[in-house]
Amino acid sequence: MLLAVALGIGGVLRAHPTVLTVMRWLGAAYLLYLAWRIATASPDPKAGHGGSASARRQPLSVLQAAMFQWVNPKAWLVTLSALATVASSAGHPSVPRAVILSAVFLTVTWPITAFWTAVGVGVSRFLRTERAVHRFNLAMAALLVASLVSVLVGAE
């Protein structure tokens, strides 16, 4: 995504700021939808501990996770902010700078992703009752809604 923006999509967004505003609001709507799905999910404490096959979902493949970033409003904000920073310090977001920035992002995000995966596994050990899972889901949904502040602050 970062390379695509550096190669030209960023120019389109700069030339048509309304597109970015629409993307931001559509992304916010999608995150609200996800928060609703999390808050209203049926709590199944066994799903993370070898529950029924129907209760478990397959995780996203690497390709699916990469494609998800194209509709992830936070990924767009990080990408555009990073390239704007590079552009403001260097005059323009050149492809070599974007490649270096992509390598830095990849180097930083892999261990962070592994950490949060481990945290998720650890937390699931404490969510043994439907009530605990439901409360956890409500807290996660509330945090997701709260995170919309960072997405929408620049929308006006």
Image (cartoon, rainbow, N blue to C red):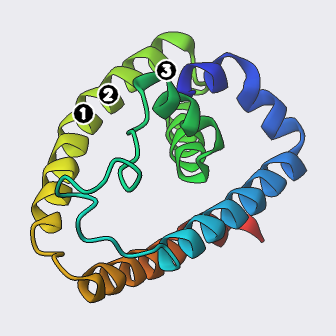
Residue at horizontal 16%, vertical 76%? 128
| SS under mark 1 | helix
Left or right, 151 with reference to 64: right
Which class describes the residues within 10 Å of circle 2: few (<14), some (14-19), or many (20+)? few
**Above or below, comparing residue 64 to residue 52 in the picture:** above
Q: Earlier in the sequence, mark 1 or mark 3?
A: 3
**Above or below, comparing residue 32 to residue 53 in the picture:** below
Residue at horizontal 37%, vertical 76%? 43
- Mark 3 and mark 2: span between their CA atoms? 12 Å
The residue indicated by pointer 3 is 98
**Above or below, comparing residue 43 to residue 99 in the picture:** below
- Mark 2 and mark 1: span between their CA atoms? 6 Å
Q: Using the image, tell me which numbered label, if any, was put on residue 106.
A: 2
Q: Quadrant of the N terminus?
A: top right
Q: Using the image, tell me which numbered label, if any, was put on residue 156.
A: none
Residue at horizontal 60%, vertical 27%? 91
| SS under mark 2 | helix
Pointers 2 and 1 in contact (CB under 8 A)? yes
Is residue 66 at all visible to an observer of this figure?
yes
The residue indicated by pointer 1 is 110
Q: Amino acid at mark 2?
A: Leu
Front-lying residue, 41 or 146: 41
